[in-house]
Amino acid sequence: MTGDGARGTPRPPWPAGAEAAQQPDWATHPAYEPSCAELASAPALVTPEELARLRRALAVVAGGGAVMLQLGDCAESFEETDADQVRAKTAVLHALADEVADGTGLPVLRVGRIGGQFAKPRTLPHEEVGGVLLPAFRGHLVNGESPTPEARAHDPRRMVRAYEASAGVLGALARERDQRTRRSTEFVDGPWASHDALVVDYEARLVRTEGGRRFLGSTHLPWLGDRTRAPDSAHVRLLASVVNPVALKLGPSITAAELGEVCAQLDPYGIPGRLTLIVRMGAERVPGLLPPLVAAVRDAGHRPVWLSDPMHGNTVREAGRKTRRLTDIVDEASRCKRVLEGAGEHPGGLHLEVAASDVTECLGGKVDGVDRLDERYTTLCDPRLNPDQAAELMRAWVRA
Ligand code: PEP
Ligand code: CO
């Protein structure tokens, strides 16, 4: 179903003419078509009933009756998907969410960057390691992180492994939700799954139809990153075609006109909670750039959840490491909250990269100097907050 038969010219799984940025280079790999076919016949990992519940909960957040925390690894690892590891990650999510619930007096919707967060967009397609030019690491769905040509080759069989790993994680999340859902069927607080719907080969083959409704079977809440959210792109068309709630990252280059176009494509009927808009501008830029975007979205009739991702716009290099300062992160999150409140909008919550263990990847709290970054710098991609740093951010954000 996926190719035209001639090796080397497979038909992409998206509408002719639509561009898909940031895609793996693997269409001529002998395992490409069998891997795609395996995904196409696999069961969906989420159900339409789950999506309906999450949409109801997001509508409550959009209306100001709850807040949302979306967090987890920058890049999930195939090696960290067993039940104990999932429990360790959701335990951090719940602890932070409980802190926000205490501070705000509102229920907190809990969403992980989990159960499929295996693909990364990259600014540069290559990196130099020890004088050798290698393809960049793009997440375990695409290649391996080891700095060798073999590990970095794009391998479509990884899509099948990603699906299998996700299936295990999503099963664990479903069992947790069942335990948490004692009374409320209206506001099921999670934990729900989300990931960057980056690799179109993977996502498009997990679209399913049930009862006449098309849904993306790979996750509850797919998001599009700042590099893949162009109006009319293959990514936007794919998410426009499914009933899952969808999220978009908004970086500093987006204009009100462009945001208006993409919102019109994804949310033509202005359904509360259909859209989650994740602001990641950089602490300095939020006050200047955000107000016209908020006005444009509201004037066009959308009722999104507004989240702040205070991390991706504040990445710096120190001592040869990518890092982020907690002070910048607190600043961006607080400014975003104040801009939204000033515009009469509900500050819907935070989107964060947080590790389940005491990593030393961001500066702040006990990580009190660049010389400490090497101690436990274990991320596969971007620097994550450790749980203590994240708790400090929660307290600051609640007060801001
Ligand atoms: C990310 O969330 O890890 C990411 C790459 O974000 P963005 O698309 O906002 O750069
Ligand atoms: Co990241």
Image (cartoon, grey):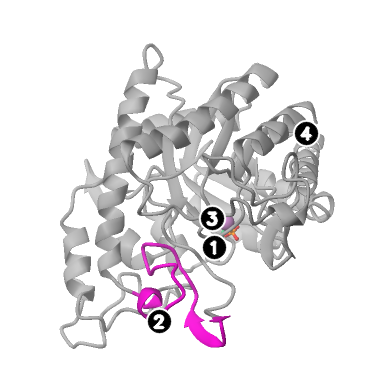
Q: Nearer the viewer, mark 2 or mark 1?
A: 2
First in sequence, mark 1 or 4: give its number. 1
Is residue 32 among the parts visible in the rendering?
yes
Q: Secondary structure at mark 1?
A: loop
Q: Nearer the viewer, mark 2 or mark 4?
A: 2
Residue topped by disc 3: 379
Residue topped by disc 4: 341
Residue topped by disc 1: 229
- Disc 3 crowd rating (10 Å Cα; few below 14, some 14-19, many 20+) is some
Report if the CB atoms under discs 3 and 1 are less than 8 Å apart: no
Label 3 – label 2 distance at C-alpha: 21 Å
Q: Is residue 227 above or below residue 87?
A: below
Which amino acid type is marked by label 3?
Thr
Label 2 – label 4 distance at C-alpha: 49 Å
Label 4 – label 3 distance at C-alpha: 34 Å
First in sequence, mark 2 or 1: give its number. 2
Ligand 1 neighbours mark 4 (CB distance < 8 Å): no
Q: Secondary structure at mark 2?
A: helix
Label 2 – label 1 distance at C-alpha: 30 Å
First in sequence, mark 3 or 2: give its number. 2
Label 1 – label 4 distance at C-alpha: 26 Å
First in sequence, mark 4 or 3: give its number. 4
Which amino acid type is marked by label 1?
Arg
Q: Is residue 94 above or below residue 38?
A: above
Which amino acid type is marked by label 2?
Pro
